[in-house]
Amino acid sequence: MKATPHEAIAVLDFGSQYSQLIARRVRELRVYCELLPWDAPWSEIERLRPKGFILSGGPSSVYDEGAPFIQQPILESGAPILGICYGMQALAHQLGGKVAPGHHREYGHAMLTVNAESPLFRGLPEQVQVWMSHGDRIESLPPGFVALAHTENSPFAAMGDGARRFGLQFHPEVVHTPRGKDILANFLYEVCGCHGDWTPSNFIAESVQEIKDRVGDGKVVCALSGGVDSSVAASLVHWAVGDRLTCIFVDNGLLRKDERRRVEEAFRDNVRLNLRTVDARELFLGALAGVTDPEEKRKIIGREFVRVFEAEAKAIGDVKFLAQGTLYPDVIESATPERKAAAKIKTHHNVGGIPDDLGLELVEPLRYLFKDEVREVGLLLGLPEDIVFRHPFPGPGLAVRIIGEITNEKLAAAREADAIFEQEIRRAGLYRELSQSLVVITPVQTVGVMGDYRTYGFVAAVRAVTTEDFMTADWARLPHELLARVSTRIVNEVPYITRVVYDITSKPPGTIEWE
């Protein structure tokens, strides 16, 4: 489900690790866009009625066999085009220029010197720092194009044909190009003539009307977890259909401390949704008894959740629709062939995760939103900031933050340690600066000394990361004083834990969660 925008940009994905980031930057500039594979059917691209095209980078060379190419209808559309890195090389190659391997691979920071007047660089200084990541480079420009800027290793670091088609050898979408967002804004507003009508308030108004039209007088159910995605989806549907929405919250015994109470207070007492809470702790913990393999844990939890949810939905009676908090990155990951073929890292809830035999039609009001857009919508809908800005929590809950067998003792330790870590992060004023924080209870046991007694307990690993898209993440450089307080409190206040370590692994090579 997508609110119909007044204007749109088509971002064509040629395989760059930054493709989603391009789309996010365009959205941040209040212009709607969609990220589509470079070989998407023209009918799928044309339905956007794009005011312009942005071509992403990619790992290929234009001379590789089967290399991605720009579809001819795009070149003939008359709409402005901005090629980035490989997108620039493909544009140059297909329009009659020459691309060749660079004498030196250019990777990292570079100083760009603007040497020609162009709407793309309007308002920027003559020299700006940019981020390069390429091997091939332009040797000669296509007919009608001129060099707009250069770096020490790239004589054609930017090119243009006047006011319609442009190429950038660098990446304006990354934070390492400090004025990159200004360049993208110039393309959107100066070149494409966009007005910036992609706003949260417009989205809410249009989405509520779409939900009303779709659902009619039908009943809707929503699996409410308390996370921002399901919370915003539920609130949006509630605005549209009122009491014909019933939210189902399943307490599986694997939740954070006071999670059930917080969800009930936020949604039943404040937002006043129809909320059914199911106490299924014994069911889930019984099914997980003795299980140590993380994949098996996930499968068991997923299976039991579907059973519980299906029973509750049938008890409501005459339900026709299921609301889900699917986000745009989930859709992108599921639709891109290269990513679908990637090695499975771990099983997780994905697009269309509810079985077909449930017989419910999906309502996914957030299907075309990124996480930061979801938060903006949530605030406008009146959700508490505590819900809107909560750090992500995995679907399987503490089951994947306890390495090995799940026991009541480990669950209690995980809850208390996690609560302490969150409290200290908030007291330090760092919660909103972090993307995710968590505590892992490891199966490793070590000797400790408390008072005059020898103790023997588990090692807890605390982890905090920063990220823009959760596809890559860096470990957070938390102050040593904060880590010391966290360690002291956990060891002193949480039974069964005798040692605390801090995880300084980035993603990749690690994942954010341990299991």
Image: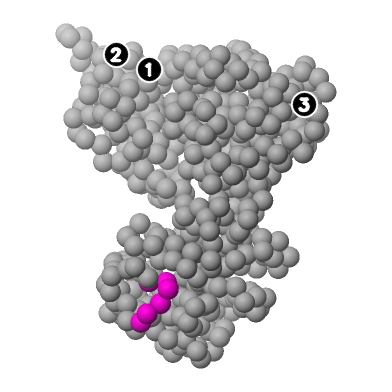
Q: Quick one: SS at disc 3? A: strand
Q: Residues within 10 Å of mark 3 (few under 14, many from 20)?
A: some
Query: Where's the N terminus, which quadrant?
Result: top right
The numbered dot on residue 416 is: 1
- Specify whether residue 58 is in view: no
For the residues bearing labels 2 and 3, Cβ distance under 8 angstroms: no
| Residue where numbered disc 3 is placed | 219
User: Residue 352: x percent and y percent?
Assistant: 69, 41
Q: Residues within 10 Å of mark 1 (few under 14, many from 20)?
A: some
Q: Residue 507: x, y in percent?
A: 40, 47
178 is higher (above) or lower (below) than 446: below
Magenta residues (range): 116-121
Query: Which amino acid lies under the numbered mark 3 shown in the image of this protein?
Result: Lys
Query: In 3D space, how far apart are the residues under numbered discs 2 and 3 (Cα atoms)?
Result: 46 Å
Mark 2 vs mark 1, CA separation in Å: 8 Å
Residue of label 2: 493
Q: Nearer the N terminus, badge 2 or badge 1?
A: 1
Badges 3 and 1: C-beta atoms under 8 Å apart? no
Q: Nearer the viewer, mark 2 or mark 3?
A: 3
**Left or right of residue 3, residue 56 in this image:** left
Which percent across, then down, holds residue 281? 58, 14
Q: Residue, x 30% and y 33% (percent of image)?
A: 430
Rendered residue at 64%/17% (across/down):
275
Whole-number angstrom distance, CA of label 3 to CA of label 1: 38 Å
Q: Is residue 514 magenta?
A: no
Given contact means CB atoms under 8 Å apart, are the residues at marks 2 and 1 in contact?
Answer: yes
In this picture, residue 119 sits left or right of residue 420: right
Closer-to-camera residue (420/237): 237
Q: Is residue 219 left or right of residue 345?
A: right
Choose the circle earlier in sequence order: 2 or 3. 3
